[in-house]
Amino acid sequence: MPSVETNAAQGRPGDGRFGDPLIRPGRPVWRLWAPVVVSFVVQVPATAALALHGSLAAGADASAWSRLSAVLTVLGAVLALLAARRSPGPTVAVVAVLSSASMLTGPVWGPPAVALAFAAGSGIVRGARGWAYLSLGLAWVLPLAAALAVGWGLSGFRIGVTTVVVVIAVLLAEGLRARREQLRAFRIRQGERRASAAQEERVRIARDLHDVIAHSLAQIAVQAGMGLHLMDSQPERAREALTNIRMASTTSLDEVRGLLDVLRGSDGAADPATGAPTRPGPDLTALPLLAEALREQGVEAVLEQHLTTQPGVAVQSALYRIAQESVTNILRHARARRVVIELVEADGVYRLCVTDDGVGAPAGPAERGNGLLGMTERAELLGGTLETGRSPLGGFRVEARVPVRGVA
């Protein structure tokens, strides 16, 4: 025989399916029993006293069975509330039918049908709005309206009080349901924002990894080729090339380790006292190293910087990565002899321009690989733009513009 826990696992909480247990661990028991107890106290004793000593409605005779059935009808409506958590829709239908029967065949004067108010409110809150409104219309309003229309001897005051109580319960339930829907929608939006932020961070790290690895491998490939070429004729130059390979690989490994620390959430990636990264990201102070890397490959590199303000961390990182990717592409594809890296601030814009005298841009639309896409995204994330084309030197030109307001 399946256990309560097994049944609970077969359905979602409060979805009305058979597997939902009557009382689940972690839920206060009073939430289930409070409506039952209140309805019992308000309806059953008063109905029993009036059924035994008062007059019944026109739908019943004065026999002992009629009086007993009037009490049992009210008691059945009250006890039906025990199923409201498991089956809220059928519960409100059953309670509406029994409440109408109590009005038509029970005491003329009696307490309001509090159980019906609890059942309707519970059905709306638990997602059975269709059941609740259909049951109230077909099993409560329609029979009582028909009975009043044909002159059946009913208590208009009792019906009115019950209707007011039911309407109040429905309004409160609708407000609670709307609040729950808003909270659920808010949680969904929060989850989507967290997922979007995580995806943006993954894309940023992927761009950084691409830039670091592509740049270092391009340097290593060029230096390795130079070393092989000069190994016999100029061993000192070959030794220098090997030294450059070691320095480039060490630098790139440090940057990759920093990115991997961020991915792992390693404690070593941040200072325990301040929370600041122990390995700061690249900034514009590293631009001379890019120029020096070009010179080590035998390329004439010119670096010009004219800034009047200090860019924010995000701007510095983006501009450096764009310059780094541009230098990487020059080393891999351009076969250039001269490269100019220019960084100026004018008219509220930081302008980074990297030009070379290499093979130049291909004819027709340029193919936008991961490198160009990454550079474009970096500029656009800061409200800037990136343009490519032929340079005045005859080769390729990369120009990024980032607003000065694009701070860290």
Image: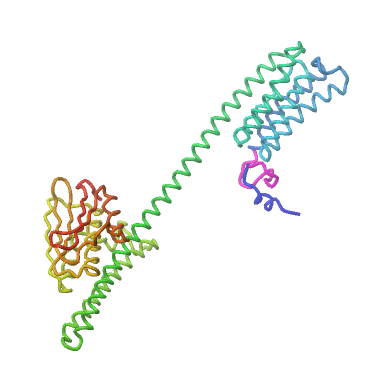
Q: Is residue 219 above or below residue 116?
A: below
Q: Let me know if residue 28 is in the magenta part.
A: yes
Q: Nearer the viewer, residue 292 or 30?
A: 292
Outermost residue, bottom direction?
232
Residue at coordinates 13% horizontally, 67% vertically from top-left? 338
| Drawn side of residue 190 relative to residue 28, left or right | left
| Drawn side of residue 85 relative to residue 247, left or right | right
Q: Quadrant of the N terminus?
A: bottom right
Q: Is residue 183 above or below residue 314?
A: above
Where does residue 344 sit, x and y in percent of width and height? 13, 53
Residue at coordinates 29% horizontally, 66% vertically from top-left? 212
* Quarter residue 31 falls in: top right
Residue at coordinates 55% horizontally, 32% vertically from top-left? 176
* Quarter residue 96 falls in: top right
Q: Main secondary structure of the magenta part?
A: loop
Outermost residue, front direction?
363
Q: How many marks?
A: 0
Where does residue 217 sit, x and y in percent of width and height? 28, 72
Region rendered in magenta? 15-30
Q: Let me know if residue 283 is in the magenta part.
A: no
